[in-house]
Amino acid sequence: MHPDPAPAGAGPDADAGSVSIVVIGHDDAAHVADAVRSALAQGPAVREVVAVDDRSTDGSAELLERLAAAEPRLRVVRLPVNSGGCGTPRNTGLDAATAPYVMFLDSDDVLPPGAVAALLAAAREADAQVTGGLCVRRELPSGREVPWETALYASPAVLARPADLPRLVRDTLAVNKLYATDFLRAHGIRFPEGRFPYEDIVFTARVWAAAPRVALVPDRVYVWHVRRAAPRLSISLDRADVGNWRARTHACRTAHTILLDAGEKRLARAVRAKFLDHDLRMYVRELPLRDETYRRAWWAHSRDHLAEYDAADRSGDPAAPGTLLARVLLASPEPRDLPRLRDLAARPARLCPPYARTADGTPCWSADLPQVTLESLPERPVRLLPLAVDAELRARTRLLRLRLHELYGAVGRAGPVDAEVQWRHRDRAGLVLRRTVPLRPTADDAWTAETPVPLERLASLAPGAWDLRLRLRFRDGATRTVSAHALTGPGLLRPHATPSPRHGLILVRPYPTHGGALSLRLAAGAQGAGRVLAGRLRRWWR
């Protein structure tokens, strides 16, 4: 069932009252008003904003009622009991929606200006039942923005059905899309009720299983606020308990079943490929941070989940990072090689030594797991190799030493020439300091380079976190951008202060990221040093 299209040549007035926006929240009085205002600010195309309060106790509902008294397009629905999740309030809002189109907004996020207009115009033009746009994750308080699934939204597109672009299953968000209301109702598409973490994954699978006509736009249509220091973390950030992983695997399994039962085998296969490449890699990167109890429970559950995958799910590139992670998990009943697995799970992936071979010379994961073979790895083009570069940084010398490892002969055949050393500021997109250094071969089949760390220049450009990236260039002109594995040990990665002609003093804290890559955090001058010390005192006091 399709919504009634706008008459040909109709102006903006034809779209007036076309969209209902469902805003859900629980105990979020600090942010819900901003979410509602961002929805109302989308203009006359918004017929109504349905704010569903999930039995808040912090005054959120009363705040919404006051806003509604001054805004006739705002309707407030209060649930009688807390549902424990996002699905029930969203379903309640969907039931209350009266416009031809509907979209969803969480109370701690916002819609950027023009979001509804961009989605609605594309939906009308393509006669699409589902229209998606670009979501950006905005880290707060820094304001750093990271786009979500940019490859999907690089340019406008219209799909007769989701199976025409299986990569759609990688965007499991429900909130960056505009839906034809009658389409959702005709197919009975709803969110899981009650406490069901990762409900978006299941809802989106139900949407794709109904085979809608889909339009995609490159416009920013949703801003997802990421508050890592919030007293109450969002479900996607609160991963310290293994129950979160169990909930995620359950949601992914449910999505796979939904698509398989609908006859969408390509999409179901893509769901499992996405799990290996995204979900599994994300949790493996954090595994070294967890305690032994968590690791063992996580490892056992992951093995049980991956055992459900059939041969076709693992028939792609056996050396692809996610597939290789799964093969190691299935081959070992106990947690093992966690730092090496973390590096393989990084983006971009790094396969760090040792580089073992079986008795007949076949590359394999390790001497202990010779059954996990890597025979396809040396044949991959250099731009796809999980190249491992070690980064050694000593406080005394301020000299960065890089070591590129050989990988079963593939690196030597490509012929490394040089490395562009890039220091990228984490919170200021586009702020990059570059320097190119030659790579020199060593007697033990590696390539090395040295370069001073430009602390004075980095501190002058901006304080904060700087991430190290390397752009490796090879003999035929091919390039590969990689991160560098941060070496640890005596004298390495030690916080220190260094004199500065301009700032007087620069505080430097080298550290490995969750993915094991080298990063620096800088503070310059007395004021910067004071902020660092004050932060440490606050953490100590807590």
Image: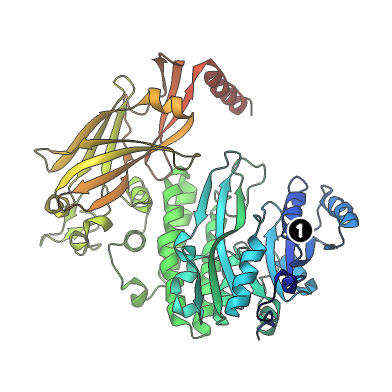
* Rendered residue at 28%/32% (across/down): 392
Using the rendered image of the protein, determine whether residue 254 is visible from the camera's viewpoint: no
* Residue located farthest toward the right when viewing the structure as drawn: 69
The front one of 250 and 420 is 420
Quadrant housing the N terminus: bottom right
* Residue located farthest toward the front when viewing the structure as drawn: 9
The front one of 137 and 402 is 137
Where 108 falls versus 506 (above or below)? below
Q: Where does the image place residue 444, in percent across and percent down from the top left?
A: 11, 40
Using the rendered image of the protein, determine whether residue 391 is visible from the camera's viewpoint: yes
Q: Is residue 136 left or right of residue 326?
A: right
Q: Is residue 381 left or right of residue 161?
A: left
* Rendered residue at 67%/78% (across/down): 184
Q: Where does the image place residue 369, in percent across and percent down from the top left?
A: 25, 58
The front one of 258 and 9 is 9
Quadrant housing the C terminus: top right
The image shows a total of numbered marks equal to 1
Quadrant of residue 179 within the rendered picture: bottom right
Can you identify the residue that label 1 sits on? 40
The front one of 335 and 523 is 523
Q: Where does the image place residue 412, in percent across and percent down from the top left?
A: 13, 50
Where 258 falls versus 170 (above or below)? below
Q: Where does the image place residue 201, in percent across and percent down from the top left?
A: 56, 67
Where 110 falls versus 168 (above or below)? above
Q: What amino acid is labelled 1 in the image?
A: Leu
* Rendered residue at 42%/53% (across/down): 284
* Rendered residue at 47%/61% (across/down): 301
